[in-house]
Amino acid sequence: MIRARLTSTPAPLASFIDLMPMKALPQRTREAAAGFIPEGGTITLKALEVDSSLSGLRETWPASMPPVTLGLKLDDLSFRLKGFDEPFSGVGGTVSLKGDNITVENVSARYGKSVLKSADATLRGITGNTAYGISAEGTLDAGAGLSLARDITGGKYPAWAKRLSRTEASGFIKLSIDALGSLKDKTPKRYAG
């Protein structure tokens, strides 16, 4: 039986990304990661626990993960994403993985003039019918939000993109969102915002 528990001091975002086992990730995840350009900040490994037999690791890796518990602290991360005009900055909070559940707590971030004051999310059953819960508060630069909506709808929903191209917006929008649902369903079971 192998039982390991690791922690770390804060590591630069770029160094942390270099340690990720990209070949073990699904193709779609690898493609999305290719557009991720780290610029700064640190990630601290608060906990990485693996509990498995050596034969269990040989039989399942990399097709599936052994039982893993992971805890990360994000501190003042900044990065660029392909397709976005400005960098995301000031990203902080915690991310944890236990079994097939992911929890994100007290996440804050900035994109241009938009600010995510606080966000919490839980994804349960990520290897099957994933249920989620999301709660977020922040302010959105209306012009940047409209531009983002245009970019997102452009390829998939041309009619919406055309409508949005004729729309102008300025100022700020205060956001407060709560949603519960399943990624399998098209609409949330509960939404307020």
Image: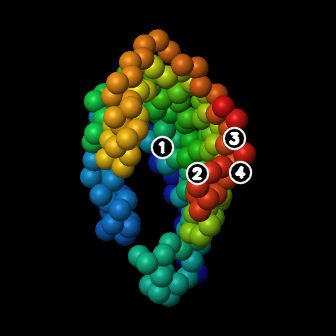
- Quadrant of the frame with the N terminus: bottom right
- In percent of width and height, residue 153 lies at 38, 41
Q: Nearer the viewer, residue 95 or 46?
A: 95
- Looking at numbered disc 3 in the image, what kind of residue is underneath it? Tyr
Circle 3 Cα neighbour tier, 10 Å, few/some/many (<14 / 14–19 / ≥20): some
| Residue under the point 66% across and 31% down | 193
Q: Dot 1 corresponds to which residue?
A: 44
Relative to residue 53, is residue 86 drawn left or right?
left
| Residue under the point 28% across and 47% down | 35
Q: Nearer the viewer, residue 9 or 117?
A: 117
Mark 4 or 1 closer to N-term?
Answer: 1
- The Cα–Cα distance between marks 1 and 2, rounded to whole angstroms, is 12 Å
Nearer the observer: mark 2 or 4; the answer is 4
**Residue 20 placement: quadrant:** bottom left
Residue 142 visible in the displayed image = yes
Q: Nearer the viewer, residue 14 or 134?
A: 134
Residue 13 visible in the displayed image = no
Check the image and tell me how it is coloured. Answer: rainbow
- Are dots 1 and 2 in contact, CB under 8 Å? no
Nearer the observer: mark 1 or 2; the answer is 2
